[in-house]
Amino acid sequence: MVPWRNVGEVLDLAMRNIVFDDKERAWIESGRSVYDLLTMLSGKDGTKYKERKFRWAAQHSIDPLPD
């Protein structure tokens, strides 16, 4: 159960994840690999996945994020 005071935050996170899922599907359907997606999203040191995931999902194209 989600407290009412957190409903907006939870809904925002859910919507951001839906956008990410749609972009991830487009990435795979374009012939790119899941491995390449995870490598790109993890960043150079492998620790930036969550931050980069939502930044990539918010951009207009499925192109990789710049380093």
Image (tube, grey):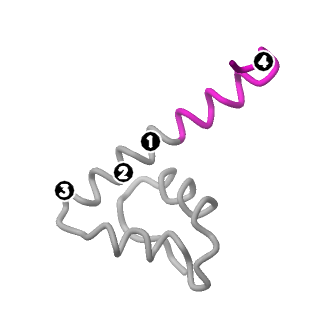
> Residue at coordinates 48% horizontally, 52% vertically from top-left?
57
Q: Which residue is disc 3 drawn over?
A: 29
Foreground label between 4 and 1: 4
Question: Which amino acid type is marked by label 3?
Answer: Glu
Q: First in sequence: mark 4 or mark 1?
A: 4
Prevailing secondary structure of the magenta residues: helix
Residue farthest bottom in this picture? 44
> Residue at coordinates 17% horizontally, 66% vertically from top-left?
31
Percent coordinates x, y for residue 41 in the rendering: 50, 69
Q: First in sequence: mark 3 or mark 4?
A: 4
SS for dot 3: helix
Q: Which mark is residue 3?
A: 4
Question: Which amino acid type is marked by label 4?
Answer: Pro
| Badge 4: residue crowd in 10 Å (few <14, some 14–19, many ≥20) | few
Stretch of the chain drawn in magenta? 1-16
As measured in the structure, the alpha-carbon distance from the residue carrying label 3 to the one carrying label 1 is: 15 Å
Q: Which residue is disc 2 drawn over?
A: 23
Q: Which residue is disc 1 drawn over?
A: 19
